[in-house]
Amino acid sequence: MWSPNPDTYPNSKISKNAPTSSLPRIQSSLLRKQKIEGSMKLIIAGATGLLGAEIVRQSLQIPEITQVVVLAHQTVHLDESIDSSKVRSVVIHGYGEYPDNVKVEFAGADACIWTVALTPLQPGFDFAEVKRICQDYTKLGFEAMCEAGPARPFRFIYLSAEGTPEDPTKDPVILPDFFIMRRNTELMVQRFPTEKEGVEVCIARPGVIANSTTWSRALVANLFRIVNRFGRTLPNIQRSELAAAVLNQVMDGFEKKTLLNADLVRLGRRELKLRSTPRF
């Protein structure tokens, strides 16, 4: 069983009185040592997407993660140079239906990184479809995993977006319907632990993924770079940093209930640095 994060779960063995500057280092060191002796089963939902593919790639390079269930609409094709022996590719027609042969693959999972979403930037934007994919499918996917009998605790991290309003009394000026829907989805995810015992959740709110490869995301990223040059800096994050950050959190425990872009950049860089440090 994975140890809880001391900031979120104060009864853990690591003292809250430990110096805050040393806590992340102590926590990562102790928990990584523990996990090397065990195993971790991770579900990655939306595995063929821009971020999902990078999370899959990085997860296969982490010894502590011994099983990776990649959930997507089509078979995930990996580079031949990558050892894919710990991958279970699960193909589904939609993220709203989970037959028994799919649920069995979820059994015993320690964590899920949920990246399934649509944005207003995608061609043929239809709000009803976006809501169904971003909100309804998240709920149905989570319930299917819980029905399958995951490990305890079961960590579920939901990828939202920077700019999602937290104050329910204030509506966003830009794309209000979309961001209100994302806010409601976050609130729904935050209620999961009250509905299912042994569940821990986290909301990740990245900004623009700076090295996006799809044309629409790349266009927006370039526009944001222009704005950054002449005006207020807008949050952005490298895809490798974001993938490393969410992997770090499902392995070591959630630092916060909501991780903003700055948190994700910090955690991602720290995780990548930790991996590059030689192990003895």
Image (cartoon, rainbow, N blue to C red):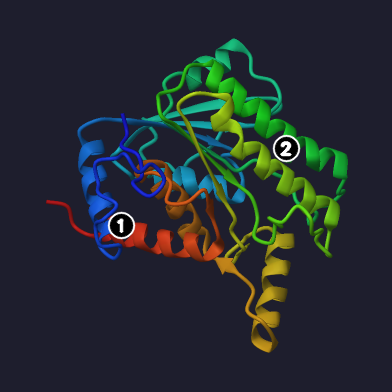
Nearer to me, 194 or 105: 194
Nearer to me, 80 or 46: 46
Nearer to me, 37 or 47: 37
Nearer to me, 64 or 264: 264
**Element carrying mark 1:** helix
- Left or right of 182 in this view: 28: left
Label 1 packing within 10 angstroms: few (<14), some (14-19), many (20+): some
In the rendered image, the vertical position of residue 269 relative to residue 118, given as above or below: below
Residue 225 spot, x, y in % from top left: 65, 78
Residue ID for mark 2: 135
Residue drawn at 67 percent across, 26 percent down:
140
- Left or right of 91 in this view: 267: left
Label 2 packing within 10 angstroms: few (<14), some (14-19), many (20+): many
For the question of whether residue 122 can be seen, the reply is: no
Asked whether the beta carbons under mark 2 and mark 1 sit within 8 Å of each other, the answer is no
The tag earlier along the polypeptide, 2 or 1, is 1
**Element carrying mark 2:** helix
Q: CA distance from mark 2 to mark 1?
A: 32 Å
Residue 137 spot, x, y in % from top left: 70, 31
Residue ID for mark 1: 24
Amino acid type for the residue under numbered disc 2: Gln
From this viewpoint, which residue is outermost toward the bottom? 230
Residue drawn at 64 percent across, 50 percent down:
160
Residue 131 spot, x, y in % from top left: 79, 40
